[in-house]
Image (spheres, rainbow, N blue to C red):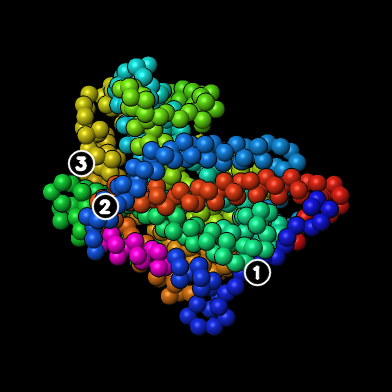
Amino acid sequence: MAKEPPMMDLSIPTAETGFYAGFSKTVAISSKILVSALIVWAISVPENAAAVLGAMNGFLLKNFASWYIYAAAFFTIVCAVLAVVPATGRLQLGQAGDRPEFSNFSWFSMMFGAGIGIGMLTFATAEPMYHFATNPSVIMGETTASGADNVTAAYVWSFMHWGFVAWACYALVGLSLAYFSYRRNLPLTIRSGLAPLFGERLSGGIGHVVDVVAVVATILGVAQTLGFGVEQFVSGLTRIGLGDWLVNEAGKPSTAGIVVSLAVIMGASTLSALSGVGKGIKWLSNLNMGLSFFLLAFFLLFGSTFFGLSALVNGFFAYVTQLPAMLFTVWSPDGTEVGDALAGWQGGWSVFYWAWWIAFAPFVGVFLARISRGRSLREYIVGAILVPSLMCFIWFTVVGGTAVDLTLNGGVGDAISGAGQSNQLFVMLDLLLSPALGWIMAVIVVVLLLTYLVTTADSAVLIVNTINAAGDESPRGRPHIIFWGLALSFVVGGLLMVGGLGAIQTAMVIGALPFSLVMVLMGIALIKAVVRDALREKNGVKTVY
């Protein structure tokens, strides 16, 4: 009721002694069993795992594609409305005297590194190049495949998948948790975001299920991201001459290459996670942001800058004007060649992305909440949605625009498009530079990629541990941190060996479905809380602990 204070205490049972001291045993043990079962299944009976996961994926894409589309639209609208409305935008994520813990640069760096860094390196070239060849406009006959008239359409869809909607998925979870944790003193864990709907019942079975679903979704979402990163990392190591044994005859990472890469990445990330957010993760985030700006500056100086900036302006204008309609567009198979092609394209791209961002949202959302205390709601949304999106747009047009321009006007043919997404950035550098300079830039890209991989993995391990520890933000339970580092390695390595990135993608889409329902409920709960708090303040009722 608006005349009564909100719930400001949520007790989550944790063990007082023993190996799980400070942890919710139900959540920690259940999530470990589920993830371990997936690992054992994928490694011991790979054919069966691939067949079952493939069948489930086909069922979900056929029956739940529209759910993912509308859910993502809902998340975007909720964030936009809360930021725009003056009464809600000025609300502070904390008490009156709270101040941000991190500088704006470190804040942006950690958000960007955790949320999109690996994908940016892989897809900044690959996605515009793919959409340049085919996208809904090409399928409907409105533009020409790989033609000059298709450049803007290619960027509209690239921006759609990596822009406002993607970051709204992250921001909603982070905003919900920050609101209830820092204003109402509830634990920094996913179940707290549902407090206005379920109240004290979240202390029991309902809350445990929510947190377990979040942990499993996080592991699968991060596994997808690391899977892309591992493939490109192996490609980079091969490019700089560390041995052809890292790849197999098909040009994909060999078993040895996967094992070595994961050992390096997860070993470094586990050590960083043990040091906490304020030390290892902050240092690595600042490093990879600095290297990112260096690489961006390189392409601004030596890439197709004018072409990229033109694509940025035209693509951004078209994207913003078409966004309202694109948010709610669902293509279903209708028996026609065009209709079936559009439905297949949307399932393989937009639905995949929304599932990926949803699966990634508990990890990034908890992390965003963890580093955003003391900021206003509007400042948080601008910082978590607009700034990273604009950075992605610039990166995609400057770096990806160089690849598109070389293909369209530079006479390189299919040298870039035919290289495979993990190799395209390295091929483009070779086309722009002499062999010696190309090798140096490849080393820089490999180092940058490694910092992004480590930042993502160590942040994920720390966040999973936080959820299992009932919202305790300290890097407690070293054996548990090590377990999740190893578990994440085995999920990525096992699924890559079973069926490559396709196997990880299938598992991730499946794991994202239950958490998508949790996120919709979080959005509803947040709206309810903000409206109720506005009414409480009018009645002079306390809304902050």
Query: Which amino acid type is shown beneath numbered disc 3?
Result: Pro
Which residue is disc 2 drawn over? 50
Amino acid found under the numbered disc labelled 1: Ser
In this view, the residue farthest toward the bottom is: 17
C-alpha distance separating marks 3 and 1: 61 Å
- In the image, taking residue 114 as reference, residue 340 lies left or right, namely left
Q: For the residues carrying marks 3 and 2, which lies nearer the camera in this image?
A: 2
Of marks 3 and 1, the one in the foreground? 1
Residue 11, disc = 1
State if disc 1 and disc 3 touch (CB < 8 Å). Answer: no
Q: Residues within 10 Å of mark 3 (few under 14, many from 20)?
A: few
How many residues crowd around disc 2 within 10 Å: few (fewer than 14), some, or many (20 or more)? Answer: many
Quadrant assignment for the C terminus? bottom right
- The residue lying at 34 percent from left, 42 percent from top is 58
**Res 435 label:** 3
Corner quadrant of residue 37: bottom left
What is the secondary structure assignment of the residue under circle 3? helix
Q: Is residue 452 above or below residue 399?
A: below
Q: Nearer the viewer, mark 2 or mark 1?
A: 2
| Residue 528 location (% of width, % of height) | 70, 47
Q: Provide the residue span drawn in magenta.
A: 32-43
| 200 part of magenta stretch | no
Decide if residue 229 is in sight here: no
Image coords of residue 361 (percent x, y): 50, 50
Q: Residue 421, relative to residue 303: is it above or below?
A: below
At x 80% / y 46%, what residue is drawn? 535
Q: Amino acid at mark 2?
A: Ala
Q: Residues within 10 Å of mark 1 (few under 14, many from 20)?
A: few
Instruction: Find residue 218 and name its label.
Output: none
Q: CA distance from mark 3 to mark 2?
A: 41 Å
